[in-house]
Structures are given as structure tokens and as C-alpha cells.
């Protein structure tokens, strides 16, 4: 039936307007709970909740408006082909737009996934969601058609504003529901100072190295063939073990938060590798694993970041609930220094010397990380010039290092890599080299330093980017090219050799033999998920402890994240906080003497 000749509103304005309204309502009910949980947004006040809901509503309005505009062409086409013109275009477009927005959102999510990974791998998990969406759209379509027939046949036709107000109230209810079901984090007591366990233990200095991504599968061949003699000496004189990484896909942020505090991620509140801040919002986290449902939201988030409304950063200290080991020891009177560990910004009060991970350029630059002025990222201020000197971008730390790790002319990006492994190697080697330089500078300044914590992240990056060339047998399907294996395969082993040499140089700066603890957050292996790289996290990390206070154990032991803080505290002569679940792996005092025998 054709409509009378009364003027009809412009279809473009209708589709955009209804798209915005329906986008907010559907987004707050369906997408917002997932977005808040995935970004671990935990507002602390009603004002922050209002800011969070407003920011999400703005994102959903943009998405809905764009999808309404694009889908409007199909609505207009259907209108022309089916009836010529709807009897009441406002009601018709208002009822059909939620279907267009829902279907368009799903298609946009799929296109973003394809554009990111050049495949649809990983979408099998969403098969049930697709069936649910199809069924919901079919039911909603029938309901919309039935409601439209009732409206246009009514003797007193209700105004379209009735539908608009209903959708608005649904959006408000969705926002309130999101706030009502947000989980609360458990209380975590702060550690003021550690209790002294022994008057003699803890005299030896302690070097604590976080070797991100280290795995025995890479380290053992290097120790066996003589390219990692320092590591081999530590293993053969002390103890070593396997760290069981928790919480697949084994993100480093959650792991390091647990390792340095002795608390689970449910207590620390750290789940992801990146954090972000925005005006009026609480500090939140940035998921790196693609969630197809949120792909359109990530696009809007990227626009917010490009405009400066959202700022990505390494996870700062306020994100970590709990007290890291260097801060425990610092409060207990131990001379401490910490270099480029996570959770070290702002640096004030964390240790005697802090070079936070807000200093220097690393792989996070590709994620749009913005760092503050370097002088605010180190402490004390009196040493800022010395601590920042190794990170001066105008001063290459070692121009020949890349040529050593990858001899010959620079190769082009391999065909099987989404990212450029050579660029990853450049970033990894440069930041690790600068990290070792500033660590050596600190030890030259204080050779009797009681506790030094150094984070080395480059091995993880190199393993991610070069795993298929080092271990081509892991990829029987779609293997790397033979030429790439021959040229790029040795890079991982050369990197281990480089780390071993820098570790030897660092140890040589101590006036007295230190205790050494090296731990990784996870291992590495072939990827089983959609990722930029073909190397990915596995659950078998490494643990090494050696030095004058560490007894020899030939067998490999099992190590928990929660054992590291008690072990470090024990090596410095302190009892671990009673709230921790882990245990010390190194006996101290009388226990140590008994373990060594007569």
C-alpha cells in the first residue's frame, strides 16, 4: 500500500538518528559489559561511573550512526522495491534500524578481524554467537513487522517519539545495569616493612633479573654448546626449575604483577600488558588479544587515542594493588635499585634508585604508547642526568649490535610474517642494551648495592618474531621458507649469547659475589592463537638461583609465581609477609647450613 502524498522525512537523517539511538541502547546492554570486563574498568565513584557510561555511549553513538548511515542505503532500496514508500517512514525506520545496526556491527567485526590477521582463524569460538544473532534478528524482524502493522492500522497513530523515548529509557537502564553488576576487587593490605628473620642472612648482595619469555628449550642448547657459559655456571652451582605460567594466554602484565608481589591477579588487579588513561575515567587496561565482539569498539578507541583523549602507557604503579618486592625491601632499610620493571612509574618512594619502564623506546611504541618527560620517570632527581644518559636517542648504545645478531645486509620482511621481525629485533636489542648500560652505571656508582632488580624484555620479543625460523619443525603446515630459516634461524641463539655476555659483565661489577635469581613470566612456543607473530607464550617458564646463599640442587624443581617474593625476601634475611601463599625455595640461616651438610 502506498502512502499519501504528505511529506516524508529525509531517509538519511532518519537512519543516522535512529542508528545513534539504537547504537547506544544495544551497545550499553550487549557490548558494554564485555568492554568493561575486558578493559578491567573499575570506577571508584558515581562520578567516574557517569564518565565511563558517557564515554561508552559516545562510542556506541558513533558506531550506530555510521552503521545506520551505511545500512540506510539498503533500507531505502528495500523500501523502493517493496512498497514504494512506507506509510509512516519514521516508525518503519525506527523499527528496522536495530536489525541493520546489529548485522552491520557483526560484519564490521569480521572485516576488522580479517584485516588484522588475513584469515578468519579463531572465529570458531563465535559460532554459537552467530547462530544466536541470526535467531535474534529473525525474531526481532518478525516482531518489528508485527508492531509496524499495528501502528499504521491504529485509528490514533502513536507518535514516533514514543519509540524514541522507549529506546532512550532502555539505554539508561542498560547503563545502570552495567554499573550494578560490576565486580569489586578484594582488599589487599600494604606491606610497610619486612620482619627480620636472621641477623646473618642477607649480607650478600642480590641481583634479581626478570628475563621475559625465557624457556629452557632455548636456553639449554645455548648452555650445552658453550654460548651461554654464565647461565650454565649459575645452573651448575645453584638450583634451577620450571615456572608454571598461569592464566592463558599467559600475558606478562598479570604474571609479573603476581611474581613481584606474591599475590594472584585477582588481588593485584593486573590482567593485561598495557594500561590507559582518559579524562574523567579511572585508570584502565588495554587488552591485546582480539575480541571479535569488541573490534568496532577498538576502532573507536584508536580514534580516541589518535585524538589524544586516550593515552596508552606501560602499567604504572597505581594499577598494581599490592607491594612489589623492591618496595618491601626499600621500606625495610635495604639499599635498592630497580631498572625498567613494570609498575615503576611514578618512581618516588619505590626504591633508592628507580629507572622506570617509562624511560626508553621499546615494542610498545607500535601500540601508540606515549611516555612523559624522562626526568619524571627516574629517581632520585639528583641522578637524573646519569640515569637518563644511556637512553639518549641521539647516542646509539651499540651500533654494531644488530650486525652481530643478524650479519649481512638487512633482509626484507619474510612473506610469512604479519609484522617485520627485523624491526622487532632492532627495538629489542636497543632497549636491552640501554637497560644493561644503566644497570652497570648503577653498580659502578654503588658496587655494594643490597638489591638490584633488572627487567630484560628483548628475548621475549625476539622469540615471538623469530620462533618459526629457529624451530621450523613446529610448523609442518605452512612452514617458513628455507632461505628465511637459514638466514634468520640463528638470531634467537645469538640473542641468548648476547644476554649471557651482558650478564657476565654485570656480575663482574660486584665487589663481593652476589646471589642471583633469574625468573621468566612464561615460556615460548608455536602460536595457537591469532597473533601478529608465530611464536607465542607457553606455560613453562624458567627459574635460576645461585650464589653464596644458595645450596646446589641437581634436580629441576617446580616453581610458582608466588614463591619468588618469599625466596627474594629470605635471601635478604627477611620473613615473607604472612598473607602470601608461596614458600621460600632457598633455605636460610640454620636451615641453609643443614642443607649444605658437614
Image: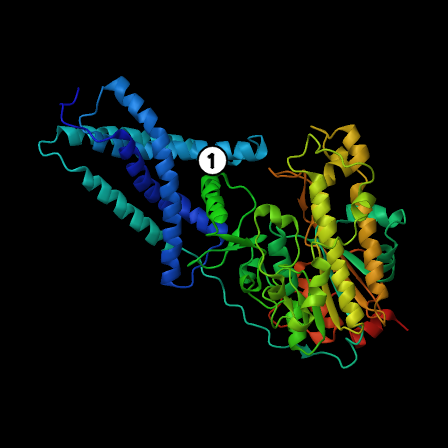
Q: Where is residue 471 in the image (x, y as percent from the top left)?
A: 77, 37
Identify the residue shown where x is 69% and y is 30%.
415
Please, which residue is most extreme toward the left here?
A: 155
How many C-alpha atoms fall within 10 Å of the one at disc 1: few (<14), some, or many (≥20)?
many
- Residue placed under numbered mark 1 in the picture: 109
**Label total for image:** 1
Identify the residue shown where x is 77% and y is 60%.
437
Does residue 512 lie above or below 118 as drawn? below
Q: Where is residue 232 in the image (x, y as percent from the top left)?
A: 86, 55
Residue 587 in sight = no
Does residue 484 lie above or below 464 as drawn? above
Give the side of residue 377 with respect to residue 1, left or right.
right
Front-lying residue, 291 or 243: 291
In this figure, which colouring scheme has been used for the structure? rainbow
Identify the residue shown where x is 78% and y is 38%.
470
Q: Position of residue 6 (x, y in %)?
A: 13, 26
Give the side of residue 380 with respect to residue 200, left or right.
left
Please, which residue is most extreme toward the bottom here?
A: 199
Please, which residue is most extreme toward the top here?
A: 81
Q: Is mark 1 on a helix, strand or loop?
A: helix
Residue 44 in sight = yes
Q: Position of residue 416 (x, y in %)?
A: 68, 31
Front-lying residue, 394 or 336: 394
Task: Tell me the quarter of the image containing the N terminus.
Answer: top left
What is the quadrant of residue 202 in the picture?
bottom right
Amino acid at each position: 500500500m502506498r502512502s499519501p502524498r504528505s511529506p516524508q522525512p529525509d531517509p538519511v537523517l532518519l537512519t543516522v538518528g535512529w542508528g545513534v539511538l539504537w547504537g547506544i541502547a544495544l551497545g550499553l546492554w550487549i557490548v558494554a559489559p564485555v568492554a568493561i570486563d575486558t578493559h578491567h574498568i573499575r570506577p571508584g565513584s558515581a562520578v567516574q561511573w557517569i564518565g565511563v557510561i558517557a564515554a561508552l555511549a559516545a562510542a556506541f553513538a558513533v558506531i550506530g550512526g555510521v552503521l545506520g548511515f551505511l545500512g540506510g542505503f539498503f533500507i531505502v532500496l528495500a523500501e523502493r522495491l517493496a512498497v514504494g514508500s512506507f506509510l509512516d517512514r519514521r516508525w518503519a525506520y525506527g523499527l528496522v534500524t536495530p536489525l541493520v545496526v546489529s548485522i552491520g556491527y557483526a560484519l564490521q567485526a569480521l572485516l576488522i578481524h580479517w584485516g588484522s590477521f588475513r584469515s578468519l582463524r579463531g572465529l570458531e569460538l563465535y559460532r554459537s554467537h552467530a547462530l544466536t544473532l541470526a535467531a535474534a534478528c529473525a525474531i526481532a524482524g518478525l516482531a518489528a513487522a508485527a508492531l509496524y502493522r499495528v501502528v499504521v492500522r491504529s485509528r490514533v497513530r502513536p507518535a514516533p517519539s514514543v519509540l524514541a523515548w522507549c529506546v532512550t529509557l532502555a539505554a539508561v537502564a542498560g547503563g545502570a545495569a552495567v554499573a550494578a553488576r560490576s565486580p569489586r576487587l578484594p582488599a589487599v593490605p600494604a606491606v610497610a616493612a619486612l620482619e627480620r628473620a636472621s641477623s646473618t642472612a642477607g649480607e650478600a648482595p642480590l641481583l634479581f633479573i626478570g628475563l621475559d619469555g625465557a624457556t629452557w628449550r632455548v636456553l639449554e642448547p645455548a648452555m650445552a654448546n658453550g654460548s651461554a657459559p654464565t647461565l650454565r655456571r649459575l645452573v651448575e652451582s645453584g638450583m634451577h626449575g620450571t615456572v608454571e605460567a598461569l592464566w592463558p594466554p599467559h600475558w606478562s602484565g598479570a604474571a609479573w604483577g603476581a611474581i613481584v608481589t606474591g599475590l594472584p591477579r585477582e588481588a593485584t588487579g593486573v590482567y593485561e600488558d598495557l594500561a590507559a588513561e582518559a579524562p574523567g575515567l579511572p585508570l584502565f587496561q588495554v587488552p591485546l588479544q582480539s575480541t571479535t565482539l569488541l573490534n568496532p569498539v577498538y576502532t573507536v578507541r584508536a580514534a580516541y587515542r589518535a585524538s589524544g583523549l586516550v593515552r596508552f602507557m606501560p602499567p604504572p604503579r597505581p594499577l598494581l594493588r599490592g607491594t612489589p618486592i623492591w618496595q618491601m625491601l626499600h621500606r625495610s632499610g635495604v639499599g635498592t635499585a630497580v631498572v625498567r620493571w613494570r609498575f615503576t612509574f611514578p618512581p618516588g618512594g619505590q626504591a633508592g634508585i628507580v629507572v622506570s619502564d617509562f624511560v626508553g623506546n621499546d615494542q610498545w611504541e607500535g601500540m601508540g604508547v606515549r611516555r612523559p618527560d624522562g626526568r619524571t620517570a627516574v629517581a632520585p632527581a639528583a641522578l637524573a642526568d646519569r640515569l637518563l644518559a644511556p637512553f639518549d636517542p641521539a647516542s646509539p648504545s651499540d651500533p654494531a649490535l644488530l650486525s652481530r645478531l643478524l650479519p649481512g645486509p638487512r633482509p626484507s620482511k619474510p612473506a610469512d610474517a604479519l609484522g617485520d621481525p627485523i624491526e622487532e629485533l632492532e627495538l629489542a636489542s636497543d632497549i636491552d642494551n640501554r637497560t644493561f648500560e644503566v644497570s652497570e652505571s648503577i653498580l659502578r656508582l654503588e658496587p655494594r648495592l643490597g638489591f638490584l632488580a633488572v627487567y630484560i624484555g628483548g628475548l621475549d620479543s625476539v622469540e615471538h618474531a623469530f620462533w618459526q625460523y629457529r624451530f621450523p619443525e613446529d610448523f609442518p603446515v605452512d612452514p617458513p621458507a628455507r632461505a628465511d630459516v637459514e638466514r634468520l634461524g640463528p638470531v634467537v641463539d645469538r640473542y641468548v649469547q648476547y644476554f649471557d655476555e651482558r650478564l657476565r659483565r654485570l656480575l663482574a661489577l660486584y665487589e663481593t659475589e652476589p646471589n642471583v635469581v633469574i625468573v621468566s613470566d612464561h615460556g615460548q612456543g608455536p602460536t595457537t592463537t591469532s597473533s601478529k607473530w608465530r611464536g607465542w607464550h607457553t606455560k613453562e617458564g624458567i627459574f635460576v638461583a645461585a650464589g653464596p646463599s644458595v645450596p646446589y640442587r641437581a634436580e629441576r624443581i617446580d616453581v610458582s609465581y608466588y614463591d619468588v617474593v618469599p625466596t627474594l625476601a629470605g635471601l635478604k634475611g627477611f620473613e615473607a609477609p604472612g598473607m602470601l601463599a608461596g614458600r621460600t625455595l632457598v633455605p636460610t640461616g640454620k636451615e641453609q647450613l643443614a642443607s649444605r651438610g658437614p
